[in-house]
């Protein structure tokens, strides 16, 4: 049961438990689930300039304990005025007054943010690498770490293109769990000869990916299918193989970590896109089992995983999937302590030419 | 009109302004003519003649003139040093050519042969033009005889031919001069433009914003790309620090003359009593190197994002995509002992607390290393790319400054190469003039200048001409010292 933005605000909040713990020391401390009364009133007498509106809403967000208050109000108001960030709006525009319509829109969008809806869902778009994609709850919002995953895939594919290996496999890639289509569409944008197939078990994600691919003009190079990698394995193999690259940002959170997620994620994003089972590897295992049947020889699997996974993956692959060879873990360089990094695992696929051949050593 | 205006302005500077530095009193805005008169009028005397009044000051330049005047093409060609230099080039060309022709087919001394060949190809156009000049001059001499002809039609024809010859000679001379000036490696690159508010508080920041807008419209006027990488505003609409990437043909070549300290004299908006203030702002122009000319090792960089500590990936949803990149080797931590490091960190804390981040970063410059940060875009990758651009430009310009300071210490006026502490231009609003101190050129109409189109272009071209002449004199001067 997910939020539909078209319903009026009051009905929406009936789905949730009382939100009073979310409001810290606010003078309109409410005890009922109906949050609509707690939204700050629209200014009727005076008009606000853009800068004043940003400051006002930053204050409101801070009071309610909304995360990243200044950035939230900046992005929402900049979006309303047609720019991506507040810096994109000229100095003179910042001192101008908002029209009545703009003020009303500001209030509506910022009120949504007050319910801890992520900014990306409030403005219904976000940037990923050099693309701007539509966002809609509950489809998973692409994270900045995934931009690095795409960068790695691109580097490898561009090298492959150079050596001419691409011709045999007709240069295709498969994405499992496409969400908004971020990974596939970025790859398509940077590699004009690539053809991509994207799968997701959530119908909303499939629709959103199709919508994004149409608005970016990649609909003839991207196939999107509503399939579950755990249940529809055979159909996937018959339809999609062979591909040279299998890439995925699978749900990799440990089930025990799900409870401690912030409200932005818990209340609005699809839990099935996050929960990876007890050890976080449930979906990953299915993908890796399927990989040898999908990939061509020397094809590669790229997975974004939790920092605790690379060792486990390496062990599991050695035991259970003979054809796959663990290659390398690329760690996100921004965290110096090394504890909380996301990791990107690369695995290489070797196909046996005949069954008589010796096994490859790891 | 210009003379009395200039004199009144100088008087305004001198009488009752004891706090102004000797630099300002001495060498501003006097053209040759006024210096020759050697006297200034006190504003109180209505005297417009050059009589000295008791309160006036003798108007001698307090320091030697940096550059005299722009020589014309003919004057340069009249100089002996140029003729000698051209002769030297010709002999070099002949020698190299004979060497190349003789050793054709031989394998010995391949390196030397290659050097000679490149010399030949470099000098060939110059020699060709000098020969063309000689032929034109011969033609010109021949027309003289025609002038003394009896036939009036022939005389008219001769006059026309003379004019055509003159023009051709001028063109060829211009071409020769431009060939003599060597091409700098960095002239072809794009640049990163950085503006920082200097002395003067809020007024300086307001002025910085105006100058940044001026450069933005100048770039548009020239057809260059102008991509803002960083923009740190102040409370009342001014600008503390901003940087932009400017790309286009000859962009660095033109913009390098804008580097230095710009000074403004006006009554600020923030001023209640209507007094005139002087504020400054600094412009830095950093050439942007290509990947080949300048590479940075990824291990030398520390890239910081908001998620420096704490979980990431699917655990967190954030819209903070700011990126900061620190270049580690450029900091020399070892030369400081622990007490000084403690001092530094207290200073930095103080500055951070009072939101003077740009100052903090400049202090960090020597301790931590070169830092660049960017939060202009929503995508983290794009912010990282922009921050890398700025970092590369900063490091490259540091390297260039080292190299050029070694090479060009002999030059008196180093237009565009002196670094960021040179006071280059004054914008005086009450007197409606802008003066460039390096070439002592004055342009009027400050409002029009700040629009960033024709007037700025005019100033820029003048600077370029002076710089070219200076380089040329330098080359010829070196030539003379060899002999």
Image: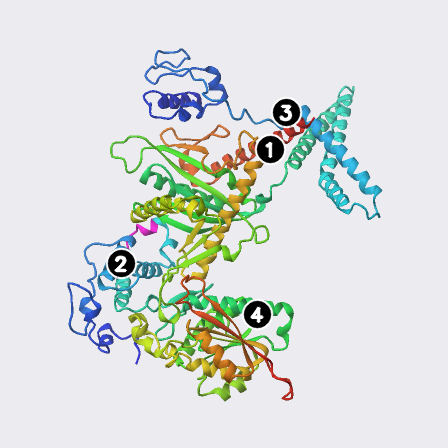
Residue B359 or residue B140, whichever sits in front = B359
Q: Quadrant of residue A88?
A: bottom left
Q: Are marks 4 and 3 on the same chain?
A: no
The local secondary structure at tag 2 comes to helix
Q: CA distance from mark 2 to mark 1?
A: 56 Å
Horizontal side of residue B26 vs A246, given as left or right: left
**Would you name the residue on which mark 1 appears?**
B471
Q: Earlier in the sequence, mark 3 or mark 1?
A: 3
Chain to which the residue tagged by mark 2 belongs: A
Provide the chain ID for the residue under circle 4.
A
Distance between the alpha carbons at the discs numbered 2 and 3: 67 Å
Q: Position of residue A191 (x, y in %)?
A: 55, 68
Q: CA distance from mark 1 to mark 4?
A: 49 Å
Residue tagged 3: B75
Same chain? Circles 2 and 3: no
Q: Which residues are magenta?
A: A92-103
Q: Which residue is mark 4?
A: A157
């Amino acid at each position: 049961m997910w939020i539909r933005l078209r319903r009026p605000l009051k009905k929406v909040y009936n789905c949730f438990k009382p939100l009073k713990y979310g409001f810290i020391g606010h003078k309109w401390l409410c005890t009922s689930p109906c949050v609509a009364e707690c939204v700050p009133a629209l200014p009727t007498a005076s008009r606000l300039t853009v800068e004043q509106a940003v400051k006002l809403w930053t204050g409101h967000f801070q009071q309610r304990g909304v995360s990243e208050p200044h950035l939230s109000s900046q992005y929402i108001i900049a979006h309303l005025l047609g720019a991506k960030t507040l810096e994109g709006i000229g100095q003179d525009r910042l001192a101008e007054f908002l029209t009545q319509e703009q003020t009303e829109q500001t209030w509506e969008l910022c009120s949504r943010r007050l319910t801890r809806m992520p900014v990306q869902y409030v403005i219904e778009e976000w940037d990923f690498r050099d693309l701007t994609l539509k966002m809609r709850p509950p489809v998973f919002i692409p994270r900045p770490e995934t931009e690095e995953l795409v960068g790695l895939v691109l580097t490898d594919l561009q090298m492959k293109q150079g050596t001419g290996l691409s011709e045999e496999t007709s240069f295709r890639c498969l994405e499992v769990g496409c969400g908004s289509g971020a990974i596939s569409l970025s790859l398509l944008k940077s590699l004009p000869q690539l053809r991509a197939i994207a799968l997701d078990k959530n119908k909303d994600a499939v629709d959103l990916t199709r919508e994004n691919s149409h608005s970016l003009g990649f609909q003839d190079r991207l196939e999107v299918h509503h399939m579950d990698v755990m249940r529809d394995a055979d159909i996937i193999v018959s339809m999609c193989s062979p591909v040279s690259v299998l890439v995925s940002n699978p749900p990799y959170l440990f089930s025990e970590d799900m409870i401690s997620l912030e409200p932005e994620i818990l209340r609005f994003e699809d839990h099935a896109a996050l929960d990876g089972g007890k050890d976080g590897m449930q979906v990953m295992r299915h993908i890796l089992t399927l990989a040898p049947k999908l990939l061509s020889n020397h094809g590669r699997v790229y997975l974004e995983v939790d920092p605790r996974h690379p060792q486990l993956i390496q062990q599991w692959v050695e035991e259970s999937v003979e054809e796959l060879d663990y290659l390398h873990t690329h760690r996100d360089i921004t965290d110096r302590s090394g504890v909380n990094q996301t990791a990107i695992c690369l695995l290489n696929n070797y196909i046996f030419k005949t069954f008589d051949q010796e096994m490859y050593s790891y | 009109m210009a003379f009395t205006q200039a004199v009144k302005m100088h008087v305004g500077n001198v009488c009752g302004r004891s706090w102004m530095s000797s630099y300002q009193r001495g060498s501003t805005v006097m053209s040759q003519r006024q210096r020759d008169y050697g006297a200034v009028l006190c504003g109180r005397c209505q005297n417009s003649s050059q009589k000295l009044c008791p309160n006036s000051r003798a108007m001698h330049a307090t320091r030697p003139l940096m550059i005299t005047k722009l020589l014309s093409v003919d004057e340069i060609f009249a100089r002996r040093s140029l003729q000698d230099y051209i002769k030297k080039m010709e002999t070099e060309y002949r020698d190299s050519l004979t060497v190349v022709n003789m050793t054709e087919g031989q394998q010995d001394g391949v390196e030397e042969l290659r050097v000679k060949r490149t010399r030949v190809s470099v000098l060939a156009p110059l020699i060709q033009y000098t020969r063309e000049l000689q032929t034109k001059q011969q033609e010109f001499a021949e027309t003289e005889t025609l002038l003394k002809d009896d036939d009036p039609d022939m005389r008219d024809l001769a006059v026309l031919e003379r004019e055509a010859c003159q023009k051709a000679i001028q063109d060829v001379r211009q071409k020769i001069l431009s060939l003599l000036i060597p091409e700098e490696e960095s002239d072809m690159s794009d640049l990163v433009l950085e503006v920082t508010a200097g002395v003067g508080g809020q007024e300086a920041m307001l002025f910085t914003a105006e100058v940044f807008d001026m450069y933005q419209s100048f770039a548009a006027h020239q057809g260059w790309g102008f991509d803002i990488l960083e923009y740190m505003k102040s409370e009342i609409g001014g600008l503390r620090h901003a940087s932009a990437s400017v790309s286009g043909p000859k962009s660095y070549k033109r913009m390098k003359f804008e580097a230095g300290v710009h000074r403004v004299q006006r009554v600020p908006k923030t001023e209640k009593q209507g007094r005139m203030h002087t504020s400054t702002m600094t412009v830095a122009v950093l050439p942007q190197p290509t990947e080949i000319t300048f590479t940075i090792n990824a291990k030398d960089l520390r890239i910081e994002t908001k998620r420096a500590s704490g979980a990431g990936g699917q655990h967190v949803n954030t819209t903070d995509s700011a990126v900061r990149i620190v270049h580690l080797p450029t900091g020399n931590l070892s030369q400081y002992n622990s007490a000084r490091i403690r001092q530094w960190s207290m200073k930095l804390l103080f500055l951070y607390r009072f939101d003077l981040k740009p100052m903090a970063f400049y202090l960090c410059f020597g301790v931590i290393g070169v830092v660049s940060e960017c939060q202009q875009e929503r995508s983290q990758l794009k912010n990282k790319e922009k921050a890398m651009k700025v970092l590369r430009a900063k490091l490259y310009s540091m390297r260039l400054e080292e190299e050029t300071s070694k090479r060009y210490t002999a030059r008196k006026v180093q237009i565009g190469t002196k670094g960021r502490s040179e006071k280059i231009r004054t914008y005086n609003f009450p007197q409606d003039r802008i003066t460039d101190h390096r070439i002592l050129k004055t342009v009027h109409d400050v409002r029009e200048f700040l629009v960033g189109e024709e007037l700025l272009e005019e100033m820029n071209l003048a600077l370029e001409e002076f710089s070219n002449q200076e380089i040329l004199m330098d080359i010829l001067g070196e030539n003379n010292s060899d002999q």
